[in-house]
Image (cartoon, rainbow, N blue to C red):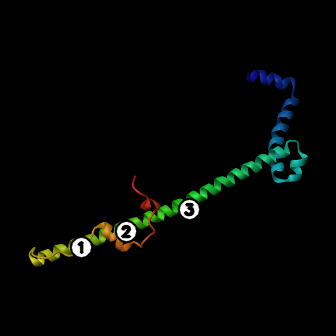
Amino acid sequence: MPAEIGRLVDQYPWILYVIGAAVAYRYIGQTLAEGSTFWAKVLPGGQWFRNRAERRRVTEAADLADLNRQVTTLDRRVRALSETAALYDDYLEYDARWHRDHNIYSAEQGWDFPPPVHITFHEFMAARMPPRAPALADHEEPR
């Protein structure tokens, strides 16, 4: 095959100029047509290049808007998870202090005492978290 191409080029050397011109037109013409309405009207195929570029811009804008929406949603979710993780950390600190105080009090009293009030994690969360509107699912009747 390469030998046949070599023979073809030897017989018709102008074919390289035609191929080079077609490749150059493809890139230079496309760039000019996409950048200017004048060149899009003047160059053959210019309007096609311009329409294709416009479709690509619309698609990219929609993709960018979708990505922006996803980032915003993920940002809200990450912030909520961070707050929840901080709440867990606060509870663990509270719980460790409670157990420490409970052990000290136990030793001082010889295990004969009413223990300090200990709350569950859910009670701790309810005391620390601001009240929020109930979710729609909370109002649905069980099936």
Tag 3: Cα neighbours inside 10 Å, few (<14), some, or many (≥20)? few
Left or right: residue 73 compared with residue 108 = right
The answer to whether 8 is drawn above or below residue 30 in the figure is above
Residue 132 picture location, percent across and down: 44, 70
The answer to whether 75 is drawn above or below residue 97 in the figure is above
Residue 50 picture location, percent across and down: 81, 48
Tag 1: Cα neighbours inside 10 Å, few (<14), some, or many (≥20)? some
Residue 55 picture location, percent across and down: 74, 48
Residue 72's label in the rendered image is 3
Residue kind at label 3, given as amino acid type: Thr
| SS assignment at label 1 | helix
Residue 91 picture quarter: bottom left
Residue 66 picture location, percent across and down: 61, 55
Q: Which residue is identified by label 2?
A: 87
Q: Which residue is identified by label 1?
A: 98
**Viewer-closest of 134 and 93:** 134
